[in-house]
Amino acid sequence: MHKELATFLEGAWRMSVVDVESTVRHVCRKVLSDTEVTVAQRKARAEGLKALGNIFLNAVSPENANGPKKTFRQQLDAFVATLAAQAGDADSGADGTGGEGGEGGEGGEGGGGAAGAAGAVPSDDTKFTAEELHAMPVKRLRELMRQRGLPME
C-alpha cells in the first residue's frame, strides 16, 4: 500500500510540476512582452526573473542539505513511511521502511504495462508503476485524473 501511495503522490507531483511550468511560461511571456511599458522596464523585469530563477535553481531540499543526495522517489518513500508510522499502520516495518521491501519504485505490483495501450485510458482500478506514470503523456494523465475524480487545480 505504501508503494502505491508513493506512486500516486509522485504522479500528482509531476502533474503539479507541469502545471507550474506552464503557468510560469505564460506569465514570463506576458511580463516580458508587455508593450504598455518601456523597453527598459521589460529589461528590468527580465533581470528580476533571472534572479528569481537563480534562487530556485540554487534551492536545496532540507533532506539533501547534508550527506548524500536522495532521489525524489527515496524522499517520497521516506515521507510515506513517516505517515504510516504516525498513523500506526500495521503494514509499516519496525525499521520505518513501510514493509513493502526495496527502496525504489520498481516492482510488479498492480497491472504491468497498463500505460502501453495505444492511447486508451485504462479503467479506474488499474494500478501504475512510477515508470508508467512518467511515460504517460500529460493528456492521458489528466484524463485518468478526471476519471478517478481527482482535482487538477
Image (cartoon, rainbow, N blue to C red):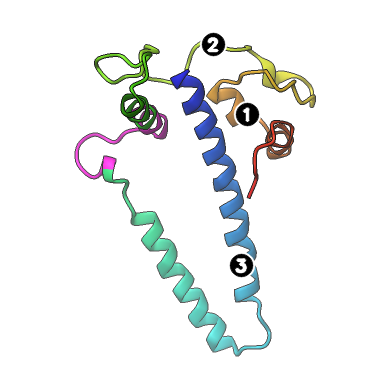
Kind of residue indicated by mark 3: Val
- Residue pictured at 62% horizontal, 55% vertical: 22
Picture coordinates of residue 60, whole percent (x, y): 31, 49
Quick check: is 70 in the magenta stretch?
Answer: yes
Q: Which residues are magenta?
A: 63-78
**What numbered label is drawn on residue 135?**
1
- Specify which label sits upstream in the sequence, 2 or 1: 2
Q: Quadrant of residue 32?
A: bottom right
Q: Is residue 110 left or right of residue 62?
A: right
Picture coordinates of residue 123, whole percent (x, y): 74, 20
Q: CA distance from mark 2 to mark 1?
A: 17 Å
Q: Regarding mark 2 in the picture, which secondary structure is present there?
A: loop
List the residue tagged with mark 2: 109
Picture coordinates of residue 153, whole percent (x, y): 63, 50
Q: Quadrant of residue 92?
A: top left
Picture coordinates of residue 26, whole percent (x, y): 64, 63
Kind of residue indicated by mark 1: Ala
Q: CA distance from mark 2 to mark 3?
A: 41 Å
Kind of residue indicated by mark 2: Glu
Could you say which is closer to the camera, residue 1 or residue 141?
A: 1
- Residue pictured at 37% horizontal, 62% vertical: 55
Residue closest to the far left: 66
**What numbered label is drawn on residue 27?**
3
- Specify which label sits upstream in the sequence, 3 or 1: 3
Q: Regarding mark 1 in the picture, which secondary structure is present there?
A: helix
- Residue pictured at 34% horizontal, 54% vertical: 59
